[in-house]
Amino acid sequence: MNTILSAAQSRPSISIAFLLSSALLLTSCQSSSSSAELTHELAPFPTLMIDNGDGFVVIAHRGASGYAPENTMPAMELAYEMNAEMIEVDVMLSSDGVPVLFHDAKVDELTDGSGNLKDFTLQELQALDAGSWFDEAYAGTPIPTLEELLIWAQGKMTLNIEIKTEAYREALSESVEPRVIALVEQYDMADQVLFSSFDYRILARLKELAPSIPAAVLYEPVQSARKGPVTVVNSLQADGFNCSVREYSEQWQQELTQSSIPVLIYTVNEREQMAELIQRGVQGIFSDYPDVLAEVAAEELPTP
């Protein structure tokens, strides 16, 4: 268990069926967040392959996405060169069931293609140009698979694998969760990854299928039904809590700190906000500029 836990750890569109299933999932939650207490043991936070020992995690959001096209291998390589301690990526499913790194439901803005990603086979996706939209220097950059990333990251980089709601399928055999877990286990990286999702159905499945692999709630207000963070973490048997900088109130900070639940905040690119959050004791921050975040952390935290 690393130093972070020694101290403590474009939202998807939501269908009516999704809301109903989420409401059922949370019906047993307490209505009062102020009195909520953690009711389960948290899985250990993943081992940091790069760790400067300050108890704070510099997380490259979709790789070093301020400098290279998001969710591509060049962005991963740059994050590694910048000594990011974790890389966050987004996972979707191709039409033939292969987990790939991509954020949007449609490929239109981030590639030279058009249409829903879920309608493309892996071969069709990897024929797209996922780099020119960012800069012509990245022309021809392909969409990587999750397996490609895991092979690159094995023993090298800790990952936050965010699974998008578009990758969920009602039939478990066709859905994303068992496929992602199988890949993580195939490459012996269960202690090197943190799962997360805005889709609470996905989180519930992940914890049921692989309870020892840590998974963090990406707070989604509608599914949470205005429940507090600890209550939501309890309902999903989750191991951490991720939210936006706007959502992270003083009340939430107090509740999460009292329960020793790791807190990661997204997406922060301004130095002043970075410094404020570090001073408030968050365990990690997602940023498009991991080099800048590392500089601010070095200024704010004592050298180990």
Image (cartoon, rainbow, N blue to C red):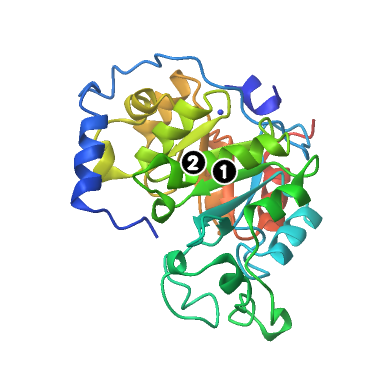
Label number found at residue 41:
none
The residue singled out by tag 2 in the image is: 177
Can residue 244 be seen at all in this image of the molecule? no
- Direction from residue 251 to residue 42 in the image, left or right: right
Query: How far, Cα to Cα, is label 1 from label 2?
Result: 5 Å
**Residue 299 horizontal/vertical position (percent):** 71, 45
Q: Quadrant of the C terminus?
A: top right
Q: Nearer the viewer, residue 87 or 154?
A: 154
The residue singled out by tag 1 in the image is: 180
Q: Mark 1: give few (<14), some (14-19) or many (20+) Cα within 10 Å.
A: many
Which residue is found at the position 37% from the left and 22% from the top?
A: 234
Which residue is found at the position 67% from the left and 70% from the top?
A: 68
Could you tell me the amino acid type at mark 1? Val
Q: Quadrant of residue 49?
A: top right
* Label 2: which secondary element: helix
* Label 1: which secondary element: helix
